[in-house]
């Protein structure tokens, strides 16, 4: 693709404007006067490709399945949601299984596949979490935070881990400090951390809360918990699963009032049942029952989601009565800044990667473009 001519384009710093855009060598080369590009109907918009920093899988595949075919399948599947970049998210399993998954992801990233959304790194969710708030993570593999164990994961991944979800209260201080030195995002999740724990973690460099509200110590009037402290900490980004199942509209509105536009990150937390019909599927060896968009274990615990990223953006726009641009930012600019790729991803600006999604006003996806090449077309 050469670019777009006289289309509705969401340009960084200018909002959605009628303009043209030239692509050269997979990058945004020029914004403005350009006549050699595609024309689009007035009801369609060119916006930045979505960045999902927390997705496990989809369409029968999971990031824990150590084959190139599974990662490619996830990449192609979520491109249909407008996702152009993502962090392949692992989960609590045996060290052997986690290392196998990380080595597979290292190989996949090095192979530079052109199809599907780009795997720009790994989100290590567990095993350094709390048994009390394990959610859908298998308890038998949960371990306290440990730097030496993490170093083995770091090596297996080829140093591609960009986020680690951990329970700070489980011996987390040393690991947090190590991760911050390595420019890895520390995200507090699956945790029984008190407000005091959270403030200490933040002082040591933690900057994110994993799927806020879910699988963490809640807000109480005598103990603000992980939820309350994450809301109060101005440096903390809060991930949000806006499927309206994990978090109700009123709780989303409370989060928005306290965190504002710049510190909420939309994620899908999608698992292998995403893009499939109702039925029984697997997550970390556990059976997950999917009925009407809800994915639950036998225990009744929610087990990831079947949410599409474009649905997440649509839902947040409606719940919070946001402008189109504001809703888009929560799935583009904010995650890109959080994982330190905003110099290349997350907005439409000269010099950045030519990653776009073409949508209508309701965020229905018509085409997804990565590096100037179409990776999905309706």
Image (tube, rainbow, N blue to C red):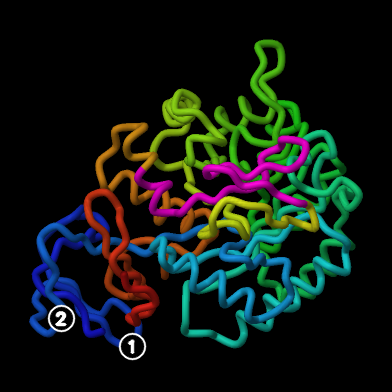
| Mark number, residue 37 | 2
Residue 336 place in picture, x, y as percent: 47, 59
Whether 87 is drawn above or below 246: the answer is below
Residue drawn at 35 percent across, 70 percent down: 368
Q: Magenta region: which residues?
A: 287-314
Q: Residues within 10 Å of mark 2 (few under 14, many from 20)?
A: some
Question: Tag 2's secondary structure?
Answer: loop
Residue drawn at 66 percent across, 65 percent down: 62
Residue drawn at 65 percent across, 60 percent down: 89
- Residue on which disc 1 sits: 25
Q: Is residue 113 left or right of residue 185?
A: left
Residue 41 place in picture, x, y as percent: 11, 65
Comparing 93 with 300, the one in front is 300
Residue 243 place in picture, x, y as percent: 48, 41
Q: Residues within 10 Å of mark 1 (few under 14, many from 20)?
A: few
Residue 341 place in picture, x, y as percent: 48, 65
Instruction: Tell me if residue 308 is in the magenta stretch.
Output: yes
Comparing 345 with 294, the one in front is 294
Q: Nearer the viewer's eye, disc 1 or disc 2?
A: 2
């Amino acid at each position: 693709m050469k670019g777009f001519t006289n289309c509705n384009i969401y340009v960084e710093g200018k909002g959605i404007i009628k303009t043209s855009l030239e692509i050269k060598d997979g990058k945004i080369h020029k914004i403005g006067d350009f006549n050699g590009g595609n024309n689009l109907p007035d009801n369609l918009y060119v916006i930045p490709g979505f960045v999902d920093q927390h997705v496990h899988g989809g369409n029968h595949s999971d990031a824990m399945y150590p084959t190139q075919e599974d990662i490619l399948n996830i990449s192609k599947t979520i491109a249909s949601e407008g996702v152009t970049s993502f962090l392949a998210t692992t989960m609590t399993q045996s060290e052997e299984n986690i290392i196998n998954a990380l080595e597979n992801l290292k190989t996949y990233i090095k192979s530079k596949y052109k199809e599907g959304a780009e795997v720009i790194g790994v989100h290590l969710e567990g095993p350094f979490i709390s048994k009390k708030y394990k959610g859908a993570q298998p308890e038998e593999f949960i371990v306290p935070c440990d730097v030496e164990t993490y170093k083995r994961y770091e090596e297996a991944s080829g140093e591609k881990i960009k986020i680690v979800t951990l329970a700070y209260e489980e011996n987390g201080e040393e690991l947090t400090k190590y991760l911050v030195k390595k420019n890895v995002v520390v995200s507090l999740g699956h945790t029984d951390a008190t407000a005091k724990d959270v403030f200490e973690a933040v002082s040591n460099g933690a900057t994110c809360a994993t799927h806020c509200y879910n699988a963490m110590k809640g807000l109480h009037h005598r103990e603000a918990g992980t939820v309350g402290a994450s809301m109060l900490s101005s440096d903390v980004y809060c991930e949000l699963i806006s499927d309206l199942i994990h978090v109700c509209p009123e709780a989303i509105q409370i989060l928005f009032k306290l965190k504002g536009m710049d510190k909420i990150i939309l994620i899908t937390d999608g698992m292998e049942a995403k893009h499939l019909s109702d039925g029984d599927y697997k997550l970390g060896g556990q059976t997950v029952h999917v009925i009407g968009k809800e994915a639950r274990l036998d225990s009744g615990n929610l087990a990831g989601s079947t949410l599409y990223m474009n649905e997440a953006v649509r839902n947040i726009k409606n719940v919070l009565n946001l402008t189109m641009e504001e809703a888009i930012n929560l799935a583009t600019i904010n995650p890109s800044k959080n994982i330190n790729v905003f110099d290349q991803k997350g907005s439409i600006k000269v010099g950045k990667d030519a990653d776009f999604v073409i949508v209508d006003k309701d965020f229905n996806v018509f085409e997804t473009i990565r590096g100037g090449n179409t990776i999905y077309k309706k």
